[in-house]
Image: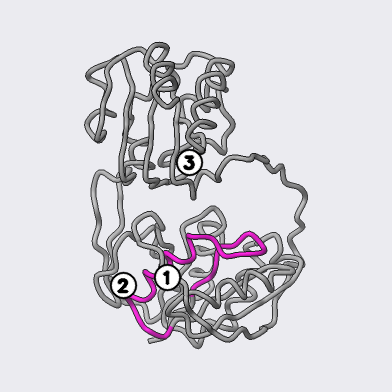
Amino acid sequence: MAVLVIADHDGSTVRDTTHKTVTAALSLSSDIDVLVLGQGAQAAADSAAKIAGVRKVLLAESAGLGKMLAEAVEATVLPLAGGYDAILTPATTDGKNFAPRLAAKLDVAPISDIIEVVSADTFVRPIYAGNALETIQSADAKKVITVRPTAFAAAAEGGSAAVESVAGADAPKTTFVSEEMVKSDRPELGAAKIIVSGGRALGSADEFHAVMEPLADKLGAAIGASRAAVDAGYAPNDYQVGQTGKVVAPALYIAIGISGAIQHLAGMKDSKTIVAINKDADAPIFQVADYGLVGDYKTVVPELMAALG
């Protein structure tokens, strides 16, 4: 059984999500190839070659692949698919975009957001905002799978796979128009080891930033937010943690003024240590918190800042 992992990268190096997807792939087979798609992505391919357990790295480049257009990804992967029994990719924004299209073209059912590999044809995935786990068995000869990276450990470095170039397709019927990138000196939310996250209880955008930014700076943390805070305009969309935002699993997650709706818990309950600060002792967030402090954040956060020195 051969498995192809479609890498997640930033153009110069593969992200941690790729290492974790390789771990999932190794549960299926020892024959793992990694496909790096992009434009000017040689450095990312070299980075992928260092992942332990990778047999070889395929590098495909084009303008459309540089923007990860789903049509370009599909046209590039389809000619390669015949050599693989399973195609895996992290359940990122890009992966969730092109994986269903690829599965449709291969006439198979996509298997999304897996958190466990039971066997070569059986997988576990969360449903109902993570309140239930579903075990599914696929009879398809070829499988297209998105992997929830937070559920797997990262594959180690130390590999020395060869890098081969393959043809990269474009997307002639699709035109990339524009994108708005948020630049920050803080860690990227999906990969951060520490996250401080704020909710609607903070009351305003000014208050949100006044409370969250100094604490994040002190801890070297990324900033997250509940959907309620994002919908209220306190924080930008890319801060959102939850079922309809980013799924994170940092070493430390500090939730300030977040009640803990199931949609938010679905995005952060796998965090190693969860600290909750809320003045409502009955807030659902305390059910998953390792440490809970019932109190007003206006008092608690300054005391925390002072204790951090």
Tell me which numbered mark, 3 or 1, is placed earlier along the sequence: 1
Instruction: Read off the residue under disc 1.
Output: 156
Where in the figure is residue 40, as x and y percent of width and height? 74, 69
Magenta region: 5-31
Magenta span contains residue 284: no
- Marks 1 and 2 sit apart, C-alpha to C-alpha, by 29 Å
Is 31 situated above or below 25?
below
Q: Nearer the viewer, mark 1 or mark 2?
A: 1
Q: Amino acid at mark 3?
A: Gly
Q: What residue is shown with label 3?
A: 245
* Residue 138 disc label: 2
The CA distance from mark 3 to mark 1 is: 28 Å
Residue sitting nearer the eye, 251 or 165:
251
Distance from disc 3 to disc 2, alpha carbons, whole Å, reads: 28 Å
Residue at image coords 49%, 24%:
229
Residue at image point 32% right, 29% down:
260
